[in-house]
Amino acid sequence: MGKSDARDRRGVIATYSNGQVRHVEGFRKAALRDHADYCDARGLSIRSLSTPETVLRDLQGARIDLTEHGMLTWKSETHVATRVDYPEPVMLAKIGRADLWETP
């Protein structure tokens, strides 16, 4: 198995609306579908999703800085916070389940 194959199978960590955190290993879409099925069976939504890439981006500070007025500062540009600033709805939309995301 090559390096990219191993990375592709790391899965996704989800935090659910009840505060539970769960890791599903495997390919990303399969892991997201598993999280969706878990939510559906328990009436939950998803508060956050993490992958190695999203964690690294957050650690690097490359995503956003939220100010007290609901504005985002991103690479010296300021704009109003929107759902597109979060990876969760984009990731969930890839399996047709953006409805599961609990908007902050």
Image (spheres, rainbow, N blue to C red):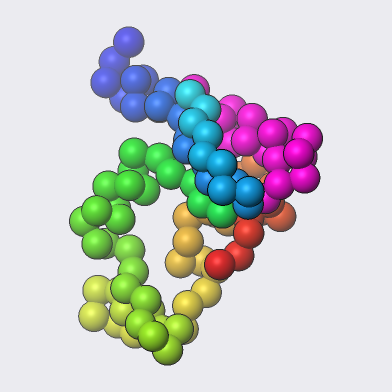
Q: Residue furthest bottom?
A: 69
Quick one: 23 or 32, which is closer to the camera? Answer: 23
**Which residue corresponds to the image point at 53% horizontal and 46% vertical from the top-left?**
15
7 left or right of 39?
left
From what the image shows, is residue 48 above or below residue 79?
A: above
Q: Residue furthest top?
A: 1
The number of callouts visible is 0
Q: Quadrant of residue 61?
A: bottom left
Would you say residue 41 sits in the magenta stretch? Answer: yes
Residue 96: give x, y in percent of width and height.
70, 46
**Which residue corresponds to the image point at 56% horizontal and 42% vertical from the top-left?**
20
From what the image shows, is residue 45 above or below residue 13?
A: below
> Quadrant location of the C terminus?
bottom right
From what the image shows, is residue 97 above or below residue 33?
A: below
> Quadrant location of the N terminus?
top left
User: Residue 31, can we see it?
Assistant: yes
Residue 41: give x, y in percent of width and height.
78, 35
User: Residue 27, can we see it?
Assistant: no
Would you say residue 67 sits in the magenta stretch? Answer: no
Residue 22: give x, y in percent of width and height.
52, 34
Query: Which SS type dominates the magenta stretch?
Result: helix
Q: Residue furthest front?
A: 19
**Which residue corresponds to the image point at 67% horizontal and 50% vertical from the top-left?**
45
Specify start and end residues of the magenta stretch as a single range: 26-45
**Which residue corresponds to the image point at 77% horizontal and 45% vertical from the top-left?**
43
50 left or right of 21?
left
Q: Quadrant of residue 5?
A: top left
